[in-house]
Image: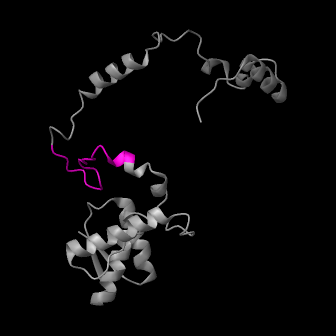
Amino acid sequence: MKFIPNTDQDRKEMLKFLGIKSIKELFKNIPEELLLKKNLKISKGLSEIELVREMRLLSGKNADLEHYSCFLGAGAYHHFIPAIIPHLVGRSEFYTSYTPYQPEASQGLLQTIYEFQTLICELTGMDVANASMYDGASALAEAMIMAFHITGREEIVISRTVHPEYREVVKTYAQAKNLKIIEV
């Protein structure tokens, strides 16, 4: 929803509802010594195009991943996102990551998931693939559980460079299975 400023009448009604006569009364509990006594020197506002130019100039001073290597880890690294991606993920059939409850109303998404899983199996030579995980963190935790069931090993090694929130999800899943997490 776009922002629509309050009209004078709106403001009068809000003040009346609050039982006050002016906006200044909202600040009467602030000690006098904390109130600003002078006008701030704020420049005239910029148009949208002027602001975009200014922000480009400022951002040009940043050290970016086009020119420098990043070793932050935890998911902070250069990502190339093809121009088509925002258009694809903006389609209504991709808005939710949940598997739909009404297949007749969501046939497009189900068809896409099926085709993706089929192509992944063909590309990797796997018998099955799952394209319906909630997010990356739960997919990582599910992979850990799958590895545990296949190998029977109760110690799970995970890199400290994995995003901290992902590691927390893994720890939560591991706790339920009494698995030991080893961070390296």
- Is residue 77 found left or right of 176 in the rendered image? left
Residue 166 x/y as whole percent: 37, 63
Q: Is residue 78 left or right of residue 166?
A: left
> Whole-percent x and y of residue 101?
56, 70
Camera sees residue 168? no
Quarter of the image for the N terminus: give it.
top right
Query: Is 106 on the left-hand or right-hand side of 67?
Result: right
Camera-side residue: 123 or 153?
Answer: 123
Question: 30 above or below 173?
Answer: above
Compare residues 138 and 35 and report the one nearer the observer.
Answer: 138
Main SS category, magenta section:
loop
Residue 4 is covered by the magenta coloring: no
Q: Residue at x 24, y 80 (%)?
A: 126
> Residue at 72% across / 18% down in the picture?
24
Q: Which residues are magenta?
A: 69-87
| Picture layout, residue 35 above or below residue 157 | above
Q: Quadrant of the C terminus?
A: bottom left
Residue 93 visible in the shown view: yes
Residue 51 locus on image (x, y percent)? 38, 20
Which one is in front, 57 or 100? 100
User: What residue is rendered at 72% in x and 26% in y?
Assistant: 29
Residue 83 appears in which quarter of the rendering?
top left
Residue 85 part of the magenta-drawn span:
yes
Residue 110 in which image quadrant = bottom left
Q: Is residue 93 left or right of residue 120?
A: right
Percent of width and height locating residue 164: 35, 60
Q: At 43% from the left edge and 14% from the top edge, which residue is drawn?
A: 46
- How many numbered circles are shown? 0
Q: Residue furthest bottom?
A: 152
